[in-house]
Image (spheres, rainbow, N blue to C red):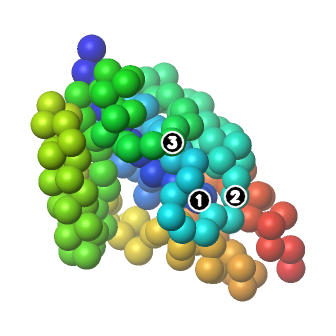
Amino acid sequence: MRKVLFPGTFDPVHYGHIDIATRAANLFDQVVVAVYDKPMKSLLFNPEQRIAMTTTAFTEIENISVVGYSGLTVVFAREIGAQAIVRGLRVFSDFEYEFRMALANDRLDSEIDTIALITSEENTFLSSSTVKEIASFGGDVSSMVPPTVHQALRERFPE
């Protein structure tokens, strides 16, 4: 079975994430979307909320599962039997960051490959930070996130 790990904070999950995971699901037998619990950045939603929203986003795709994790991503990939880590690339600066991370992960475990998927053109501008900023100012993010995430953002940032 070809299994890939798609890690991230997913704070919150948006259509760019969904696009990458869905495309990975067409390439691999199983995609494990892994919600990182303690990144070194401030989060809007706690791990349980992020896992719930991300799980809801993928209920229609049978070969995508959602789990929470902590620790080193490459170690978690090994623990679940993933052959690769998939990442999405939007802009050139993403490439630089992901390239460094891929090299570091390769140093830690050379048997786990990193695969980068280029985002779809319509999602190039999307990031969780952009979604949160727009939502915090009362902007409409309904075209950027699934309905459950949109509702959670509306509750978090009441008008």
State the mark number for residue 11.
1
Amino acid on which disc 1 is placed: Asp
| Residues at discs 3 and 2 in contact (Cβ within 8 Å) | no
Residue positioned 69% across, 75% down in the render: 135
| Badge 2 amino acid | Phe
Q: Position of residue 102 (x, y in %)?
A: 20, 52
Mark 2 / mark 1, whichever is N-terminal: 1
Q: Is residue 120 left or right of residue 10?
A: left
Is any atom of residue 57 visible in this view?
no
Q: Which residue is mark 2?
A: 45
Badge nearest the viewer, 3 or 2: 3
Calculate the distance from the C-alpha at mark 1 to the C-alpha at mark 3. 15 Å
- Given contact means CB atoms under 8 Å apart, are the residues at marks 2 and 1 in contact? yes
Q: Earlier in the sequence, mark 3 or mark 2?
A: 2
* Element class at badge 3: loop
Residue drawn at (86%, 79%), measured in percent from left and top? 159
Circle 2 packing at 10 Å, graded few (<14), some (14-19), many (20+), is: some
Q: Earlier in the sequence, mark 1 or mark 3?
A: 1
Q: How far apart are the two marked residues, 2 and 1, measured between alpha carbons?
A: 6 Å
